[in-house]
Amino acid sequence: MAEKQSVTVRIAGEEHVIRASAPPEYTRACAKLVDDRIMEIRSRAGLLDAHKAAILAALSVADELLQVREELARLQGEVERRTATLTQRIQAGLHG
């Protein structure tokens, strides 16, 4: 397991020190995604307090994650179906 490193990030105008085993660039990228989503929500909703914006940002990111997981499962199923079809065709060609 990688050693944890401290990284200072800015989210919703506040600095936070994050200790993570991920590379600092990855932690910064995650923080930027969250900050960008909060800022997007605040700009669309007007003067929304930071706490509510953070909750809505978390829900938005969770929604995106669940949709991507669903799409990944669909694509994995498609790859499995195509692999099975190709395997059958190859086997039929070898025995035919």
Image: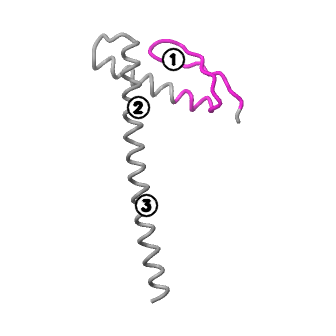
C-alpha distance separating marks 1 and 2: 21 Å
Q: Is residue 10 magenta?
A: yes
Q: Residue furthest left?
A: 45
Q: Amino acid at mark 3?
A: Val
Q: Is residue 73 left or right of residue 3?
A: left
Look at the numbered discs 3 and 1 and tell me whether their residues touch, using CB distance below 8 Å: no
Q: Amino acid at mark 2?
A: Ala
In the picture of the structure, the residue carrying the numbered disc 1 is 10
Q: Quadrant of residue 18?
A: top right
> What residue is shown at x 41% (from left), y 71% (from top)?
85
Badge 3 local density, few (<14 within 10 Å), some, or many (20+)?
Answer: few
What element does badge 2 sit on? helix
Residue 93 numbered tag: none
In the picture of the structure, the residue carrying the numbered disc 2 is 62
C-alpha distance separating marks 3 and 1: 40 Å
In the picture of the structure, the residue carrying the numbered disc 3 is 79
Q: Is residue 1 left or right of residue 16?
A: right
> What residue is shown at x 50% (from left), y 12% (from top)?
14
Q: Which of pointers 3 and 1 lies earlier in the amino acid sequence? A: 1
Front one among 13 and 89 = 89
What element does badge 3 sit on? helix
Q: Is residue 26 magenta?
A: yes
C-alpha distance separating marks 2 and 3: 26 Å
> What residue is shown at x 38% (from left), y 45% (from top)?
70
Which residues fall within the magenta stretch?
3-29
